[in-house]
Amino acid sequence: MDKTVNLSQYGKKFQEILAFLIFQDRQFSNQIREILNVDFIEYRFLQVFLELIWGYKDKHGAHPSYEAMVCTLRSGLNEQDDIVRKQIRDFFAYYKSHKIIEEESFVKTSTIEFCKKQILKDVILESVDLLETGQFDLIRENITKSLKLGTVDDFGADFIEDFEYRYSSDSRTVISTGWPEIDAITKGGFALGEVSVVISYTGGGKTTVLSKLGAEAMKQGFNVAYYTMEMSPEQICHKFDAALSNVPLDLLKSNKTHVLKSIKKVPGRLFVKHFPALKATTNSIRNHLEKLQEEKNIKISKVIVDYPDLLTPIVSVNDVYHDMGRIFNELTGIAQEFNVSLDTASQSNRGGLNAEIVTMASIADSYKKAHPTDFIYTVSRTIRDLAQNAGRFFIAKNRFGQSGGVFPIVMFPGDMIINVLPQDYDVGDDGEQEEKETLSQKFKKYQKRRVNG
């Protein structure tokens, strides 16, 4: 193999991201190891880093977890000089705290293509001598083997080999909800490949909740695709403007300069696509995501669908109960296929109107909506709550911890404020009075919140 060829054409950052992806993604590590010669890497400290990863795997029979890699970097660099040791540790610390989702697909694809070309070139050159001696079968065998190298060998989770990984913090790529109380019961937030559903009645605040989740994701550097079948893109964007700039909805226009300055500082991007109600299917969403990825090279990490009750199933059985179940199954498929955190909403039936607690029994049309989802929570706001800007989140389903909890909330939809308070399972007369006092303090704080321009 020609060792003078390397990845220098892609630059240092590309090679650093590649090295960290090999550490971060076990399946990609296995795939690329077949075809990546470490000499393709231009920088010595990255070569050493890869040798440590694969050396650990050869010795222990498992891909290193973050904790294992930290120990390896402490004990396995004694033979390296001070410069290389510092470069590796600085590189590892930097990429551990910085997200590389945006570049992931490009780096993986480009590296695989580059390595396969180099291997095929070498096989073709070797075939010249074999051709002269008439060893045609060997030529065909060598070329066939080279074409198979680096293909995806995904046999699923290996119970033993993935032991360290499933106990590491890297096993789920989590997007914080922005609500510490909810993050605490979901192991950090809503993760890529998972689906959350908020349920409430008409006007209960579903779109406000979804917009808050999207804005929080953008603050963390994640790109968001918002699909609306009800409100216009302009209305949705106004909600994000308010959430990201701390300017109430009714004051946005008079504070345009401040709003623009604020949203330009947000690292994540937002794309809002409107589909007419009952005219789009989940394939419409899938096609749009593919276009963003392929034509604009945008990696979306959070998808928001507002809301599935207004989608049409790809294949209808002319039965609302089963059709709605199909739609939610299709959305779960999108979350897993595109590796996105998917947040959506559903309408409650009339039983949820003015209820103290909206439960899953109030899901409109089909209980099958609940089956494929990971996290379901409801928003309940009685007439008294509306007057006091209060309400409750009820945790109806939680695959990551305890369900059934009730969290009081402070909610100012016009200001795009939702504050989740600690849950209280036994709110008696004294507890209710204490809760009112706590809410009252929150109300006074947020009622003063206005931007003067």
Image (tube, grey):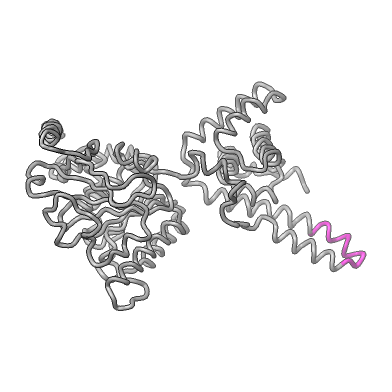
**Residue at image x 60%, y 40%?**
19
Residue farthest toward the right in the current orientation of the protein: 133
Write down the quadrant of residue 183 in the picture.
top left
Q: Is 131 colored magenta in this rendering?
A: yes
Q: Is residue 122 above or below residue 96?
A: below
Is residue 159 visible in the rendered image? The answer is yes
Determine whether, in the image, residue 134 is placed left or right of residue 361. Answer: right
Residue 203 x/y as whole percent = 15, 55
Q: Quadrant of the C terminus?
A: top left
Residue farthest toward the top in the current orientation of the protein: 82
Determine whether, in the image, residue 335 is placed left or right of residue 4. Answer: left
Residue 41 x/y as whole percent = 67, 40
Write down the quadrant of residue 233 in the picture.
bottom left
- Magenta residues span 124-135
Write down the quadrant of residue 327 in the picture.
bottom left
Residue 292 x/y as whole percent = 42, 57
**Residue at image x 32%, y 52%?**
397
Q: How many marks?
A: 0
Determine whether, in the image, residue 61 is placed left or right of residue 18. Answer: right
Q: Is 56 colored magenta in this rendering?
A: no
Using the image as rendered, state which of residue 282 and residue 291 is in the foreground.
Answer: 282
Residue farthest toward the bottom in the current orientation of the protein: 318
Q: Is residue 191 above or below residue 307?
A: above
Residue 9 x/y as whole percent = 63, 44
Q: Is residue 165 above or below residue 229?
A: above
Q: Is residue 141 above or below residue 203?
A: below
Is residue 41 visible in the rendered image? The answer is no
Magenta-drawn stretch, dominant element (helix, strand or loop)? helix
